[in-house]
Amino acid sequence: MQKVIFLVAPGINNWGSIFGDWRDWPTRFSVWVNTRSVSYIRCQSFFYFTTALTVWLMQRTRALSFSKLIRDYIAAGYKVHLVGHSNGTRVVLDALRMADWPEVETVHLVNGACDADFERNGLNHALTHDRVKRIFCYIADDDKAMKFEDTAVGLMLFGIGWNDVPLGLGGPRNVVPKFQNSRVVEEHWPRYGHSDCWVPANFDATMRQLMQNAGV
């Protein structure tokens, strides 16, 4: 059986990366996968810390590090699934571009603080050239963080064009029609805020949804 790895990129204000709190959601994500899945399925979370005001600093460095993580696991014979939350979706997409779009299984963009346009963000290219099998876009319908990001200041800080909206607010846009609703899936959480999918009361349901979508 071929080995499987979930690589996870969190967003801003990831305080657990500073204080070492095991309750931080990326750590809990890894524990959930590594203890509840079969032996050939594993997870590694990528830790960094930044705030909304400093997010533009080191973004390229973060993406480059994550791209090397992807490449190393693929070279070691793993099937790779990618999960990004908030600014972590930018880390994932930038890393895929830097790695020249390696072949991955699924990409999960959770409340994405990234460009929603699939032509500009490269995902149409990845789908057309079979570099990714399926893409899941999760949207919290009560996401106040994404509403802030859709302001002049927010768009500037997160590198999104003035006339555009973040993926976590507007959903995927400009998707190649034949991929819409087949290889690109949009899922909504009607009563969730930006990080409610990771709170303890919702965490298990979120994980099961992600694993089911990933087909593992």
Image (tube, helix red, strand yellow):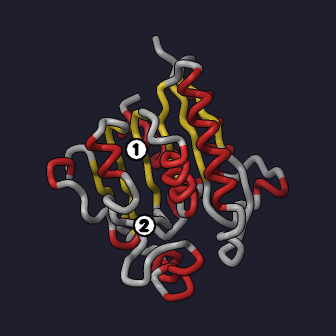
* Amino acid found under the numbered disc labelled 2: Asp
Q: SS at mark 1?
A: helix
Name, please, the residue furthest toward the right: 19
Q: Which residue is mark 2?
A: 115
Q: Which mark lies nearer to you, 1 or 2?
A: 2
- What residue is rendered at 70% in x and 66% in y? 13
- Total labels: the figure holds 2
* Whether residue 18 is situated above or below residue 193 in the rendered picture: above
Label whose residue precedes the other's in the sequence (1 or 2):
2
- What residue is rendered at 37% in x and 55% in y? 137
In which quarter of the view is residue 119 placed? bottom left
Circle 1 residues within 10 Å: few <14, some 14–19, many ≥20: few
Q: Position of residue 196 (x, y in %)?
A: 52, 63
Relative horizontal placement of residue 85, taking residue 44 as reference (left or right): left
Q: Position of residue 189 (x, y in %)?
A: 37, 62
Circle 2 residues within 10 Å: few <14, some 14–19, many ≥20: many
Q: Which residue is mark 1?
A: 209
* Amino acid found under the numbered disc labelled 1: Gln
Relative horizontal placement of residue 134, taking residue 81 as reference (left or right): left
* Whether residue 55 is situated above or below residue 44 in the rendered picture: below
Q: Position of residue 178 (x, y in %)?
A: 15, 48
In which quarter of the view is residue 213 placed? top left
Q: SS at mark 2?
A: loop
Q: Nearer the viewer, residue 160 or 15?
A: 160
